[in-house]
Image (spheres, rainbow, N blue to C red):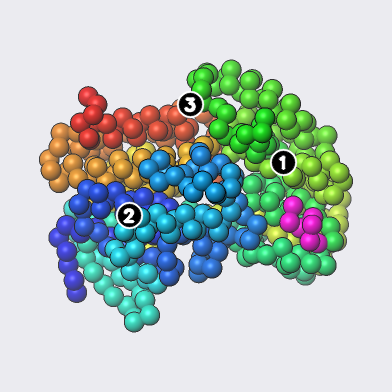
Amino acid sequence: MKQTRDRLALIGAGPMGLAAAKLLLEQDIEFQGFELNSGVGGLWDIDGPRSTMYETAHLISSKTMTEFADFPMHEDAAEYPSHREMKRYFQDFARHFDISRHYRFGAEVLSCTPLGAPGDGWRVIWRDAEGEHSEDFAGLLIANGTLSTPNMPTFDGKFDGDLIHSSQYRYPDQFKDKRVLVIGAGNSGCDIAVDAIHHGISCDLSMRRGYHFVPKYVFGKPADTLGGAIKLPMALKRIVDGMILKWFVGDPQKYGFPKPDYKLYESHPVVNSLVLYHAGHGDITIRPDIDRFDGQTVYFKDGTSAYYDMVLAATGYKLDYPFIGDGLLNWQGDAPHLYLNCMHPQRDDLFVLGMVEASGLGWQGRHEQAEMVVRYIKGLREGAPAATALQQTKSQDFSRATGGMNYIDLPRMAYYVDKATYRKAVRRWIGKLTGRAA
């Protein structure tokens, strides 16, 4: 069995893992990367063994607001790149920073076990085409993503048609000659419903609650590039942005969408104009929550019913770290409770990267998270006072960086943060760790 005193194990070669790998190389910290897929890209590689991508998927944020600051997307890339453009982007990123040679591809991590007390290291067991292997590492960086384990609800009754989760959806021709019901109107659910409208016989959309809809373009420019020039208090920002949405989106309730039971920005908005367009043209019927199944008939909670050939549950994903015990990650409720969503309160040899969501955070915001972690590891090894200060801070009581936002109580919101509050805190620690701030 191999044992490396200072080398770290990095799990995942999606965008978060790649950002961490780049920063570890820049700081001369040895690591071994592990990736189940045959190459980089994470879920953006539709051919990957655990990808949940579908053929028509595009970013819901613009390339300008999504790209890494030190590695812009190609100027020919679309404003809202497809999954194929994103896969190519991450491949180019890995090539540019010479990352791939530090990874074992086709390697499935089976378990990560501490060797003793915090600081004694970790034993990682993985499996590849040659069998099972084991190696000991000084620390563990988990970057396996948040969107790979389906959250499939249970329903009363039995549906005799095709019942699938959105993770099983790949191509629009899956809807051919089918009457389709999509459950869930998040961003993926609305995207997929538009596909079903064009390729199936009919499509209905079942919604448990209302959503705030945001257009992709405002005044001919990506909507997410227009904000931020003037910082407004949240109460005023809601008024201003709400007026803009009324101008460009109108009132979704006119098309049958339920009214949101929460304020703007208390959940991730739906960035999709096409579903509203089709609802306004009568191409899609908005349905309430499901009561039960009976054969191929679906009964809804308002007493109505309809016949379907396929029911697709676009009900999101669960956080899942199957190779490590929940207790080691300090789970509280629906997510691990970690300082700034990545740092364990007591352990300095365990970090979870990418378990963070915020409107407009982009890959750069996640890159900053990785930079804070990597510079913290380097600072601890060098005895830097700033690292000691961060160590003390994260060991005390702390709360999520919500900026006072009252996010709706759903599992997918359990690791949601306010972008401005989060990035300010992370950048402050980066400044201290690099000596650029007091």
Q: Is residue 253 above or below residue 5?
A: above
Residue farthest to the bottom? 130
Residue sitting at 40 percent across and 40 percent down? 69
Q: Name which quarter of the figure residue 219 lies in.
A: top right
Q: Residues within 10 Å of mark 2 (few under 14, many from 20)?
A: some
Please state the horizontal and vertical placement of residue 34, each as a whole percent of the image: 34, 65
Q: Secondary structure at mark 3?
A: loop
The quarter of the picture where the N terminus appears is: bottom left
Kindly identify which residue carries mark 2.
97
Please state the horizontal and vertical placement of residue 289, each as a whole percent of the image: 74, 48
Residue sitting at 78 percent across and 31 percent down? 251
Residue sitting at 81 percent across and 62 percent down? 200
Q: Residues within 10 Å of mark 1 (few under 14, many from 20)?
A: some
Relative side of 54 to 205, left or right: left
Question: Gap in Å between the C-alphas at discs 1 and 3?
Answer: 29 Å
Residue sitting at 72 percent across and 63 percent down? 172
Residue type (three-letter) at the residue carrying disc 2: Phe
Residue farthest to the left? 383
Task: Tell me which segment is drawn in magenta.
Answer: 194-200
Question: Gap in Å between the C-alphas at discs 1 and 2?
Answer: 37 Å
Kindly identify which residue carries mark 1.
273
In magenta stretch: residue 198: yes
Residue type (three-letter) at the residue carrying disc 3: Gly
In magenta stretch: residue 24: no
Question: Gap in Å between the C-alphas at discs 2 and 3?
Answer: 38 Å
Kindly identify which residue carries mark 3.
404
Q: Given contact means CB atoms under 8 Å apart, are the residues at marks 2 and 3 in contact?
A: no
Q: Secondary structure at mark 1?
A: loop
Q: Main secondary structure of the magenta part?
A: helix
